[in-house]
Amino acid sequence: SPPITTDTRMGDTWLIGSPLGGLGVSRRPGRRRLMIAEGTGIAPLRAQLLDMPRLDDTPRTHVFVGGTYPCDLYDLDILWGLSRTCPWLTVVPVIENSDNPWWVSGNTQNPAGMHDLLTGQLGRVVATYGDWTDHDIQVVGPPSMVRATKYQLMAAGVDSADICHDPLY
């Protein structure tokens, strides 16, 4: 997280406490879910996804995972494995650049059978992918991505009350 790794200076005081925000598995009956994450934002969504199979009526859920490069989509194997055993789950990877940077070596291919990589700005790709007006939506990642995604979804007709994210600083 940039506030910890790059913005911290010698002598800074930290207050460690409970997480802020209102993310969590929604219990609104009859509503489908849309989860959007970039970078380490996938961690709180993955925790929810791993817990959702125990629900009596697990709703249809789309997860969009974004990154700048294919190598940034580090958690696809786990998400893809979960989606293969959970018919209610669709995982869609989104990248801004189709080629990895020069310093990345090794294979960063999608797991076999997974949805093709979509290329573009995450919020724009999600907003144009489908109609999300009847979904409970969670957006997690860098504040600039969260803002951009929220605005794109609202421009596509989604009510802002249906979009949940942690506080933006």
Image (cartoon, grey):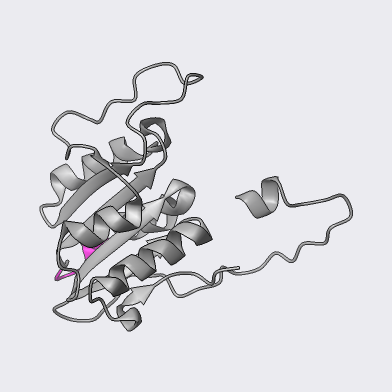
Q: Nearer the viewer, residue 46 or 125?
A: 125
Which is more toward the observer, 154 or 43?
154
- Which residue, as the protein is rendered here, is positioned at the far left? 87
Magenta span has 54? Answer: yes
Q: Residue at x 34, y 83 (%)?
A: 161
Q: Pinpoint residue 45: horizontal percent, then vertical percent.
A: 37, 57
Residue 79 drawn at (x, y percent): 28, 44
Front residue (pair 131, 111): 131
Q: Is residue 29 magenta?
A: no
**Residue 84 appears left or right of 138:** left
Q: Is residue 65 above or below residue 155?
A: above
**Residue 53 appears in view:** no
Q: Nearer the viewer, residue 57 or 153?
A: 153
From the viewer's perspective, is residue 101 above or below residue 2?
A: above
Point 16% across, 70% down: residue: 56
Q: Residue at x 35, y 50 (%)?
A: 121
On the rendered image, what quadrant is the C terminus found in? bottom right
Residue 94: quarter of image: top left
Write down the region rendered in magenta.
Answer: 52-57
Q: Position of residue 5 (x, y in %)?
A: 68, 45
Q: Residue furthest top?
A: 106
Please determine whether, in this image, residue 74 is positioned above or below residue 85.
Answer: above
Horizontal side, residue 10 vs residue 133: left or right: right
**Residue 126 visible in this rendered orientation of the protein:** yes
Tell me: 65 left or right of 128. Answer: right
- Which residue shows up at 45% across the image and 75% down it? 22
Q: How many marks?
A: 0
Q: Residue furthest right?
A: 11
